[in-house]
Image: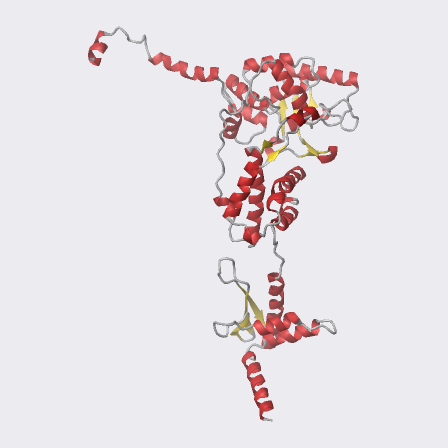
Amino acid sequence: MLDTILLAALVGLLLASYWDSSTQLHYLFSGWAKQPAGQKPLNSIRYFLSSRKSSGGSKRRGTKRRLGPNEWELRTELLRALDGSRRRTYEKFVGTSREADRRLAEILEETDSLDKVERPETINELLDRWLASEVEPMVREVTYLDYKRRADTYVRPLIGNLKLKNFSLAKAEDYRNALLRRKVKVRNSSKRKRRGQAPRQLSETTVNGALKVLSMSLNYARRHNYVATNVLHDLKRRQSDAAEPKKRALTAAELAAFMVAARGNYWYSLFALLASTGLRPSEALALSWRHVDLDAGWIHVERKLTLLPGGMFQFDPPKTLSSKRKVPVSPGLEQVLLDHLSRQEELRAYDEKLELVFCDLTGRPADSRNILNRHVKPIAAKAGIRGSVTLYSFRHTFMTLSTNDTGAPKLTSRVMGHKDVAFSQNVYEDPDDEALRQSTLPMDAFLGDGGGDDEEGVVAAD
């Protein structure tokens, strides 16, 4: 009998210790009522048992404080941040004490659901969540596919199964070194040549692209408190050891030689347009004849071509707001486009729906990579041009030669679709050797006749 009385007294003391707010009891019984028949409210019991901290006194996860008649401040404790700092929520509530208890219990249920959000455990899970929730809805489809390809090819096979919490700076260094040592087979159109070539190491551009994708996903994890820091911020990158930078802009002589070597080629008019206007290749390949007004002498740039996997394509808005523009057509370029239209009609190389200016023989959008490999590179070799020549080389060439000739970089930048003329000059203008020589000639006016026979000068030197 005495044992029963002591046990009842102990239970009474326990209940009295919680009676000041009664939030925990309310949460316990409300959770019990919501459970299906035959199941125990484990979450409610777990919360009830852990509502008091094991150390630190009587602080609880939820408290209420009276501010005035029927006015309360409800405070709830969230899980601590990664740096150990406390996180709290506050809410003002107007009502009776019992109503405030019920509202505090509801807040605790909501915060519990927030705390139980599943965190990605591995690098693979992080990449999946990052691509699905931040990349795919926010960027163009071709950009999303490029990020996904880098993640699937260079990140997942090496560290995809690694625990996110175990990804340290040392692990990042091991991953970087593994990428630098990794070798891949050379892609070549000829199977016979591919068999005879040894695998090559990944280029620095590929390695940096893989590290960029991983770093962006870790930044996403840091913003969502999945990790404390992005360890790649402290990772050292290998500096480029290229002996000579690739050539970007053609000189006037090289451009003339290229255009002579390209005469008769199906894509001659494309090369002429790129060199005369500085259009981006994707903008030129998206041009429809309704965008070309030869009577007024203007080309209206309103879209760009995006090639997708599986031979699919789509037309997207230009790269920036300033890229949507009109470009003047010179008399020489006008004649080239008229000749191209006549040849296109002769070959029936058009699609009535697309009406593309530059297309393949079926009227479908052309692949810039095929044009580069099958036409630009052979023509450049025929013209005796050393160094790399791409379709973007014409854009650099236009900026350099047009600016040198007109002396008005702002006009050239406007034609190219840049908002900032400084960006055009820094990125696209490549002065050649002759332009560099010309920059020093005006200083000859200050040198006089040389003064080699001046006896006073000789005496002074002595």
236 up-or-down from 220: above or below: above
In the rendering, at what x and y percent does residue 89 appear? Answer: 54, 64
Residue extending farthest to the top is 453
Q: Quadrant of the N terminus?
A: bottom right
Question: What is the total number of numbered labels drawn onto the structure image?
Answer: 0
263 up-or-down from 71: above or below: above
308 up-or-down from 374: above or below: below
Please indicate, yes or no, whether residue 13 appears anywhere in the rendered image: yes
Q: Residue at x 64, y 13 (%)?
A: 261
335 up-or-down from 321: above or below: above
Instruction: Please tell me which residue lies in front, 280 or 13.
Output: 13
Q: Residue at x 63, y 51 (%)?
A: 125
Q: Residue at x 56, y 66 (%)?
A: 91
In the rendering, at what x and y percent does residue 228 appear? Answer: 51, 53
Instruction: Please tell me which residue lies in front, 324 or 160.
Output: 160
Q: State the image quarter where residue 102 is shown.
A: bottom right
In the rendering, at what x and y percent does residue 269 appear? Answer: 67, 18
Please indicate, yes or no, whether residue 208 appears anywhere in the rendered image: no
Q: State the image quarter where residue 10 is shown.
A: bottom right
| Image colouring | secondary structure
In the rendering, at what x and y percent does residue 292 appear? Answer: 69, 23
Q: Quadrant of the C terminus?
A: top left
